[in-house]
Image (cartoon, grey):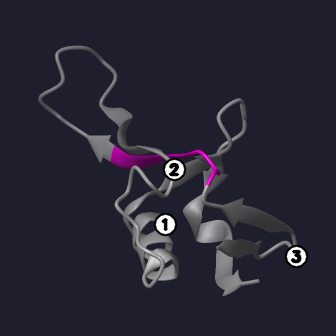
Amino acid sequence: MALNINLVNGRSIHITEETYIIAWKYQSSMMASNDDHYYLDCIFKGGFEDGKITEEDEENKLEGLISAADWITIGKDNKNSLKTTAVLSITRD
């Protein structure tokens, strides 16, 4: 299994079953007890195995994760996040 996340800037990110992904969803709350009303909730952390992705639907599961998330980080030690609206397409190798 190998997929490519193709970005609007022309860059591609190679994804395999070993690729570690962290995904966040934007949240806000007027009920927050402090002045920080805007934050991100982690909605996924792990690899394809952690997401119960099978050989037949790995592309669909990645599309679903990207659609549900506002920000993703690809790779366990990566310090850069990617806004999911920058994703143009997902292609299979």
Task: Measure how far apart labels 1 and 3 are at the Cα level.
Answer: 18 Å
- Residue drawn at x 41%, y 73% is 54
Please indicate whether residue 53 sits to the left or right of residue 73 in the image: left
- Residue drawn at x 18%, y 24% is 32
Crowdedness near tag 3: few (<14), some (14–19) or many (≥20) residues, C-alpha within 10 Å: few
Magenta span: 18-26
- Badge nearest the viewer, 3 or 2: 2
Q: Quadrant of residue 60?
A: bottom left
- Say if 42 sits above or below 88 in the image: above
- Badge nearest the viewer, 1 or 2: 2
Q: Which residue is mark 1?
A: 66
**Pointers 1 and 3 in contact (C-beta within 8 Å):** no
Q: Position of residue 52 (x, y in %)?
A: 34, 61
Crowdedness near tag 2: few (<14), some (14–19) or many (≥20) residues, C-alpha within 10 Å: many
Say the numbered circle drawn on residue 47: 2
Q: Secondary structure at mark 2?
A: loop
Q: Position of residue 16 (x, y in %)?
A: 67, 62
Specify whether residue 20 is painted magenta. Answer: yes
